[in-house]
C-alpha cells in the first residue's frame, strides 16, 4: 500500500513538473514571438500575442504607454506604418534574455527577465503578465524599465 501511494505521489509530482516546464517554454515562445513579429512589422502576427481587452497595458517609458487593446493596436499600427527603414528592427532580431523568473498560477502567469540587444551596453528589466485563453498564453501587461 505504501509503495502504491509513493508511486502515485511521484507520478503526480512528475506530471506537475512537466506541465510547469511546458507552460514556461510556451510563455517564452510568446515573448520571443511578440518581439520578432513586431521587428518584422507583421501587425497581424504581433496582435495574436495579446489579450484584446480594455485592461491590456503596455509601457516602455513614462511617455510611451498604451491603455487598452484599441489604443495599443492603433499605436503599433501607426508606428509600423510610419517607420520605414526602422533602425530598431535589426536590433530586435538580436535580443538576449537572461535571469528568467516565471510564476504560473492556474491560467495567469507573471514573468520577469533581463533583456539586452547586441551592441547596446544597456539592458532593461522586462515584466509581463500573461493569461491562458483557450489553451494559449496571451500578454495582458508588458512593461520595460531601463
Image (spheres, rainbow, N blue to C red):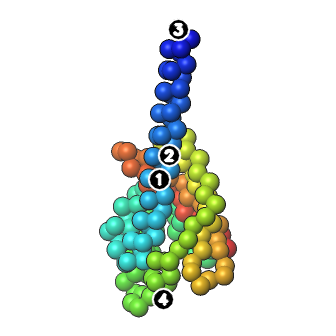
Residue at the spot 39% in from the left edge and 71% down from the top edge: 37
Q: Which mark is residue 25?
A: 1
Disc 3 element: loop
Q: Are marks 4 and 1 in contact (CB under 8 Å)?
A: no
Q: CA distance from mark 4 to mark 2?
A: 35 Å
Q: Position of residue 79 (x, y in %)?
A: 43, 81
Q: CA distance from mark 3 to mark 4?
A: 65 Å
Residue 65 visible in the picture: no
Side of 121 relative to 130 (left or right): right
Q: CA distance from mark 3 to mark 2?
A: 30 Å
Instruction: Give residue 124's quadrant in the image.
Output: bottom right
Look at the picture and state if 137 lies above or below 65: above
Specify the quadrant that holds the C terminus: bottom right
Disc nearer the start of the sequence (1/3): 3
Residue on which the image places disc 4:
87
Q: CA distance from mark 4 to mark 1?
A: 29 Å
Look at the picture and state if 82 lies above or below 138: below
Q: Which mark is residue 1?
A: 3
Q: Which mark is residue 21?
A: 2
Amino acid at each position: 500500500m505504501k509503495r502504491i501511494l509513493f508511486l502515485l505521489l511521484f507520478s503526480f509530482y512528475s506530471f506537475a513538473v512537466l506541465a510547469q516546464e511546458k507552460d514556461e517554454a510556451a510563455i517564452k515562445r510568446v515573448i520571443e514571438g511578440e518581439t520578432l513579429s513586431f521587428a518584422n512589422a507583421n501587425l497581424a502576427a504581433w496582435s495574436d500575442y495579446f489579450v484584446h481587452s480594455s485592461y491590456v497595458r503596455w509601457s516602455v517609458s513614462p511617455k510611451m504607454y498604451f491603455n487598452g487593446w484599441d489604443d495599443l493596436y492603433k499605436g503599433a499600427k501607426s508606428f509600423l506604418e510610419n517607420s520605414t527603414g526602422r533602425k530598431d528592427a535589426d536590433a530586435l532580431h538580436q535580443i538576449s534574455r537572461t535571469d528568467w523568473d516565471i510564476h504560473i498560477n492556474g491560467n495567469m502567469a507573471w514573468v520577469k527577465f533581463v533583456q539586452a540587444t547586441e551592441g547596446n551596453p544597456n539592458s532593461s528589466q522586462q515584466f509581463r503578465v500573461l493569461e491562458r485563453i483557450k489553451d494559449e498564453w496571451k500578454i495582458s501587461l508588458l512593461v520595460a524599465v531601463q
